Amino acid sequence: MAPKGRMPLISGNWKMHHNHFDAIQMVQKLSYRLSKDDYKTVDVSVHPPFTDLRSVQTVLESDRIPIALGAQHCHWEEKGAFTGEVSPAMLAKLNVSYVIAGHSERRTLFGESDEMVNAKVRAILANGMTPILCVGESLEEREAGTTEERVRAQVAAGLAKVSAEQVAGLVIAYEPIWAIGTGRNASAADAQAVCAAIRATVVSSFGAAAGEGLRVQYGGSVKPSNIVELMAEADIDGALVGGASLDADEFARLVQYQSV
Ligand code: PGA
């Protein structure tokens, strides 16, 4: 496998799973399964529900586990009358490193528009954290042959008013909606084609250095049986994993994809 010069990022998106007791057990198990050498070649993040963040932070920091803390969502305002929401500043205070923005479940089930996703991306950056901007086409769009057009438009909208320097440090996750939680993953070649189009969009708007630094993850039914071929592709720099991240053994195998 050719080294790409970008550190791979394997992220576990727990969605609405695991209470804070389960979450503590999960990170402790992960810390037993993973070795110092694993963290030298891969960045790892876990994205528990909000109610678990403080507990997971405490375990990661007190046991010095080099797994980055991630969140699944946030609002874009600093504070205010937004019942039920959590601000990026609150996440930053918990030493959250990565925040997912625009996951398709939030876009489709909770009505997040491209404008809202862009506001979040900018707020996450303004608070010193790294956005994982999610993009991806529906089954209808794939069948209509408009996948790249859709994804390019989501990238452009999501990164509006973001600087080239900031883009160089961020993460975009390509997650075809039809592959999320369905057991059906995009083939490595198809995923590579879309991830290359994402990078090309970034290069044309923000320049070569931004495209070179940007990490592009693939997400959608990533599992131990398909991660190796996905990660071998030139423009796939990591994986955003849902279902297979809920079990510590399975997630550890994904993190260790280079040694299987
Ligand atoms: P999945 O979810 O791995 O269960 O398909 C991926 C995601 O939604 O991030």
Image (cartoon, grey):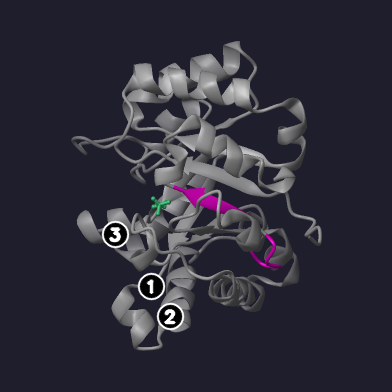
Residue highlighted by disc 1: 137
Q: In the rendered structure, does residue 81 fall within the stretch colored magenta?
A: no
* Extreme-top residue of the structure: 62
Closer to us: 72 or 164: 72
Badge 1 vs badge 3, beta-carbon distance below 8 Å: no
In this view, the residue in front, 166 or 5, is 5
Q: Which residues are magenta?
A: 232-241
For the point 51% across and 38% down, which residue is it?
A: 250
Which residue is drawn at the image coordinates 75% and 26% (left, top)?
36
The percent coordinates of residue 56 (x first, y second) are: 46, 21
State which quarter of the image contains the C terminus. Answer: top right
Where residue 245 appears, x then y in whole percent?
46, 40
Mark 2 C-beta closer than 8 Å to ligand 1 = no
Q: On screen, 214 above or below 150? A: above
Instruction: Name above or below for residue 24 compared with residue 165.
Output: above
Dominant SS type (magenta): loop
The residue pinned by badge 2 equals 147
Q: Amino acid at mark 2?
A: Thr
Q: Which of labels 1 and 3 is toward the front?
A: 1
Mark 1: give few (<14), some (14-19) or many (20+) Cα within 10 Å. Answer: many
Secondary-structure class at tag 2: helix
* 39 horizontally vs 124: left or right: right
Q: Which mark is residue 107?
A: 3
Report whether 86 appears left or right of 153: left
Question: Does the magenta portion include 238?
Answer: yes
Q: Position of residue 83 (x, y in %)?
A: 18, 35
Query: 23 or 162: which is nearer to us?
Result: 23
